[in-house]
Amino acid sequence: MRSTIHTLNFGRKMEDIRNILKKHRLRITEGRIGILQYFLDEKKALSHRDLEFRFNELDRVTLYRTLQSFTEKGVLHKIPSDTGNVTYGVCFDTCSPQVHQHEHIHFECMSCGKTECIDLDVPELEVPGYRVTEKNFLLKGICSDCSEN
Amino acid sequence: MRSTIHTLNFGRKMEDIRNILKKHRLRITEGRIGILQYFLDEKKALSHRDLEFRFNELDRVTLYRTLQSFTEKGVLHKIPSDTGNVTYGVCFDTCSPQVHQHEHIHFECMSCGKTECIDLDVPELEVPGYRVTEKNFLLKGICSDCSEN
DNA sequence: TAATTGATGCAATAATGTTGCATTTTCTTG
DNA sequence: CAAGAAAATGCAACATTATTGCATCAATTA
């Protein structure tokens, strides 16, 4: 990344962002700060395509690799979908390369298209004969924003 | 046209297969019979890639279109995944173009890689402020086959 | 500040998915 | 059962999405 002007817009969360990257053993670069900031601001699932649209100064390949390293280091997690487009969401604080907290509830709004993380516990489920180590709940419907109108 | 030799290999399920296609208003062709048979035999989620590998006599595009029409007509359903590869599974009997029974539990085995449909009811889940119309449960772990060894 | 390690951009390539059109096959109906 | 209507297939071209190798550059470490 070549412009410095950009950096000024990040505001007071700047230190938080740097700390998250540091905590997960990721080098702090202008691009990564911008991308993580974007995820935190949007508060919804984002795809590579979203990033490409938002950060046209960054190379496509860099975005792929950023998503990958963020995921490996526990900053982001992949969100299951039946569309074939992988999207990513910000992990809980507790995630690290070693321990990913993978129990998630994701809600996809069929009105606005937004996918968000729901902060509720995933229901228990036993499957006889199977060892379940990870549960993901995928919900579709109308989100609270869209329900109001 | 039916080639008789080919037909013999399908065994006694042959009529079932044709009936499923007929019931869902899909024209009966040799390719479709083979594909549906394959899904029923494998009893696990299959991707376009799997079909391409298995049916190299059929065109890639035909496979895409077959998966699409099977899905539209309620023979198959898409299975959510975080890999970016869409896979498909056989629907319950009750599915039709009008009414898809979308409540599914899918289990992905981290040992053999197989994804299968689990025939259990999806747990209830209320999200305050949200209207939930569809629930999918995605489990990972070790399947019963792999657990035994 | 120099050395090390990792990040980035670029080019090339691979894999995956889509569209239009000519041809063939299935199904319908007289 | 033959002929026409409707749908499926194959092929070619194209579009999109993802991956890899390598040279260069930037961030961390000592």
Image (cartoon, coloured by chain):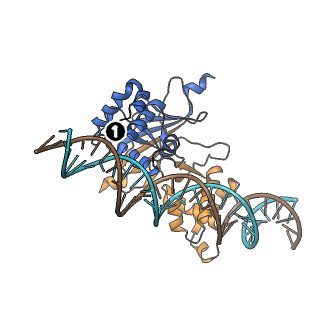
Chain colours: A orange, B blue, C brown, D cyan
Residue B129: % across, % down: 36, 47
Residue A22: % across, % down: 69, 57
D14 relative to C12 in the view: left or right? left
Q: Nearer the viewer, residue C11 or A41?
A: C11
* Residue lying at 68% horizontally and 43% vertically, measured from the top left: A98
Relative to D15, residue B129 above or below: above
- Image-quadrant location for residue B29: top left
Tell me the amino acid under the disc marked 1: Met
How many numbered circles are shown? 1
A32 relative to B87 in the view: left or right? right
**Residue B77, visible in the rendered structure:** yes
* Residue lying at 63% horizontally and 58% vertically, measured from the top left: A65
Residue B59: % across, % down: 45, 49
- Image-quadrant location for residue B13: top left
B99 relative to A26 in the view: left or right? left
Q: To which chain does the residue with label 1 belong?
A: B
**Residue A29, visible in the rendered structure:** no
Helix, strand or loop status at disc 1: loop
Label 1 neighbourhood size at 10 Å, few (<14), some (14-19), many (20+)? few
Q: Nearer the viewer, residue B49 or A24?
A: B49
Residue at label 1? B1
